[in-house]
Amino acid sequence: MCFSSSIVGRSFTGPTNVFALLCRSFSRTQGSANEEAQELTMRSVTKRPHPEKPINELLDRGFSVGRGHVARLMRNMGMQALYPKRRLSQPAPGHKVYPYLLRGMDITEAGQVWSADITYLPMARGFCYLTAIMDWASRKVLSFRLSNTLDASFCVEALEEALERHGAPKIMNTDQGGAQFTCEAFTGLLHDRGVRISMDGRGRWLDNVFIERLWQSVKYEEVY
């Protein structure tokens, strides 16, 4: 019989203790081999052009794992999930912040309220930024733009296209934290068309909930 090095040199009070220690040692050995196989599986998954979630791949291959176990494996392997970070855009000093106008409002007609926001998409190297203009009542995306920088021009272009193709809404709701939406180039277009401007309360993603759901769908169903 071969004994693990972890039990050599120990004293035992009876056969039961010996058996229990042997079982624990065997379990640790088996667990280590099992985790090595899981890590190899995860590495093979992440090398694919469009990888599945590691936990789904492990479950499909018969490993009994949970989210906590997969998170620990990822930490051990130096892996990190890509997910939306907070405070992507920052307010600019001196830009006017407008009040939130949608609280308690019944929004039932297309063209009554539009919303706009920015998110980022992971690339092979770095990120690109996506902005979209959405009609609140119909949930229709009226226009969008991609950019590799966070200047205001791609947001202004998206707004110009939406206004040209669909006319002006009564209210435009945006994020008060983004300098792209509080700059004169963006707000000036809205003022010229007689559009009232509404801005989310700071840290209140529910104030712009429908476009936040759009980002979730785009990222977790199409990108990640």
Image: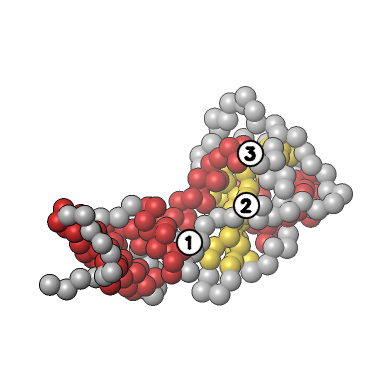
Q: Which mark is residue 81?
A: 1
Q: In which quarter of the image is the N terminus?
A: bottom left
**Residue found 23% across the figure and 58% down from its top:** 12
Q: Mark 2 points at which residue?
A: 86
Q: For the residue carrying disc 3, how many other residues have a C-alpha within 10 Å: few (<14), some (14-19), or many (20+)?
A: few
- The kind of residue tagged 3 is Arg
Q: Where is residue 67 in the image (x, y as percent from the top left)?
A: 37, 52
- The kind of residue tagged 2 is Arg
Label 1, label 2: how far apart the Cα atoms are: 15 Å
Q: For the residue carrying disc 1, how many other residues have a C-alpha within 10 Å: few (<14), some (14-19), or many (20+)?
A: few
Question: Cβ–Cβ below 8 Å for labels 2 and 3?
Answer: no
Q: Compared to 183, does 103 lie above or below?
A: above
Q: Mark 3 points at which residue?
A: 204
Residue 141 placement, left or right of 38: right
- The kind of residue tagged 1 is Ala
Quadrant housing residue 19 = bottom left
Question: Cβ–Cβ below 8 Å for labels 1 and 2?
Answer: no
Residue sitting nearer the eye, 8 or 153: 8
Q: Is mark 1 on a helix, strand or loop?
A: loop
